[in-house]
Amino acid sequence: MPPVVEARGLTKRFGAFTAVDGIDVEVAPGEAFGFLGPNGAGKTSAMRMIGAVSPVTEGHLQVLGLDPGSQGAELRARLGVVPQEDALDQELTVAENLAIYGRYFDLPRAVIRERIDELLEFVQLAERRAAQVDPLSGGMKRRVVIARALINDPELVLLDEPTTGLDPQARHVLWDRLFRLKQRGITLLLTTHYMDEAEQLCDRLVVMDRGRIVAEGAPSQLIREHATREVVELRFPPDHEADVATILAPTGHRIEVLPDRTLVYADDGDALVREAHDRGLEPTAVLTRRSGLEDVFLRLTGRQLVE
Amino acid sequence: MTTPIALRVLEGHARSYRHTWRGTTIGAVATPVLFLAAMGLGLGQLVDADPEGPMGDVGYLAWLTPGLLAASAMQAGAADGTFPVLGGTRWVKTYHTAVASPVRPRDLHLGNLLWATIRITVIGTVFVVVAALFGAVPLSRGVLALWPAVLTGVAFCAVLSAGVVLLVRDQFLAGLNRFVVVPLFLFSGTFFPVEQLPAAAAAVARALPLWHGVELTRALALGQPPAFAWQLHLGVVVALLVAGIAIGARTFDRRLRP
Ligand SMILES: Nc1ncnc2c1ncn2[C@@H]1O[C@H](COP(=O)(O)OP(=O)(O)OP(=O)(O)O)[C@@H](O)[C@H]1O
Ligand SMILES: [Mg+2]
């Protein structure tokens, strides 16, 4: 099957500033594909080109076999978009927000009514159908936006930071819904700066930084390639003078000194902790955890994802 | 059969208007009616006391009514070219959502204009009926005078929304009202003939598009010929509308598809 998204050398410039700097991306049908990157990495800019709302500055881009430049309207009719900001009309009801959007696709009113019922059921908001949007919680609003994005029965859904700003419980509800979409065979393209989200949802992802792709692969593969099995986080009191990096250097592990803690990448975390004690270090807190995409990002860019 | 996209946008306006019509419509009708009562009935007594006055044998109330009709249509058009557009781009950001669907930026512009046309027609009709009850205009002439007033309002809506869509801050809003809408409202031959102004100021007033709209509206309401050829007056208003649509097609695109 031909790819759903095919980008080569995709570039977006605003004046002299390059927001997306020649990225290559290929997304297969039914795949959940992620753009992981910090603020300003160019995730939204890339998504907006793929969604045919922002003209491509340079490079090749095909989405669902269409050219977003010349076949934009036709393409947008087959996409679902969850923008970074909800943009719901707060004064209207949940159903009205969906109905207005549905009419933009020229769907018959009867079809819209039916789909609203189904979709609100799907996002678990059936009882809020006639409720005003304004008083809904952030997580509920996000679910309304997902329902809105599905009103035209899209083949590809673009989600720009679907869970940013939500509490952990609301995020899990959302992830569950997105996972179900994926099970239905809908291709998902999402951006996030949460590694747990990328790990949960994405079959494959690219790590973006300053408009470029710095790594690509399945989450587990990226972790395997760029991080150790475990990470030890050591915290020291604020007035701690000793140079931890130098003291631990002979262990041969990679060390990242962050403002609030020091990370040591070791396959056997417990052994590393014992060794640190043997070398006279007395951290106030020690945490041994599995490594994640956050560590991959730190490794590749020397910076943290969420700063 | 597919529905033209601007009509789908129009439908969205109509749906959301169900929640907001009271506040916006009552204000848009009440203001000119208040002016009509205060100026037409109150001030009119003073004006009409002078038989040599600039209104000639037309009473002040009858002279003022079409001016208010056109000027309040302009004001309503200016409001429709401002608030829904800023709502779409900045406050609620519904325009950004809409352009992710098959709707194009220019459809949003046209849809808003169609909506403004309906709204201004309704507001103008209510005003004409009230004015007829005041005895300010015969109902038939008032209804006849509606179309140039509505055309004027829609033309202002087109031009303003073409500019407002580019605004990235709200601070221009107060200035827009204070330095554009209110002076136009006051000095376009609405409350007094522009001949009353010093010659230079009168020349400026005659260059204002609203004055041309007022002249057309007044000519139809009073059954008198306008100041210049009606083709000229109509040409100015239509040119404003066409320019608003053409410029808006570009500015909406620039803003919503960066
Ligand atoms: N319309 C625009 N005009 C000028 N610069 C822009 C525009 N849109 C985005 N940029 C710039 O492009 C860069 C990338 O922005 P983009 O929104 O794509 O990043 P992002 O990865 O989505 O970030 P975030 O996580 O904050 O949403 C930023 O530096 C931003 O300031
Ligand atoms: Mg973004």
Image (tube, coloured by chain):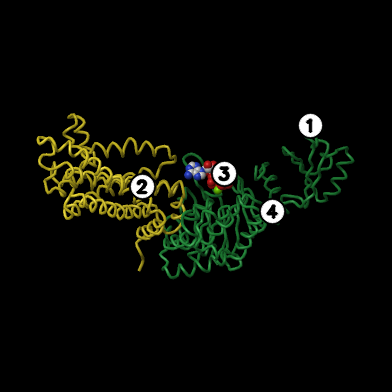
Chain colours: A green, B yellow
Label 2 near label 1: C-beta < 8 Å? no
Q: Which mark is residue A40?
A: 3
Q: Quadrant of the N terminus of chain B?
A: bottom left
Counting from the top left corner in percent of width and height, residue A11 is at 51, 48
The numbered mark 2 sits on a residue in which chain?
Answer: B
Q: Which element carries disc 2, helix, strand or loop?
A: helix
Q: CA distance from mark 4 to mark 1?
A: 36 Å
> Which amino acid does the dot numbered 1 rest on?
Asp
Counting from the top left corner in percent of width and height, residue B152 is at 25, 47
Instruction: Please state which of residues A42 and A214 is positioned toward the viewer in this rendering.
Output: A42
Label 4 near label 2: C-beta < 8 Å? no
**From where the camera sits, is residue A20 visible?**
no
> Which amino acid does the dot numbered 3 rest on?
Gly
Q: Which residue corresponds to mark 2?
A: B250
Judge depth for marks 4 and 1 and give the one in front.
Answer: 1
Q: CA distance from mark 2 to mark 4?
A: 44 Å
Q: Judge the density around disc 1: few (<14), some (14-19), many (≥20) Cα neighbours within 10 Å.
A: few
Q: Judge the density around disc 2: few (<14), some (14-19), many (≥20) Cα neighbours within 10 Å.
A: few
Judge depth for marks 1 and 2 and give the one in front.
Answer: 1
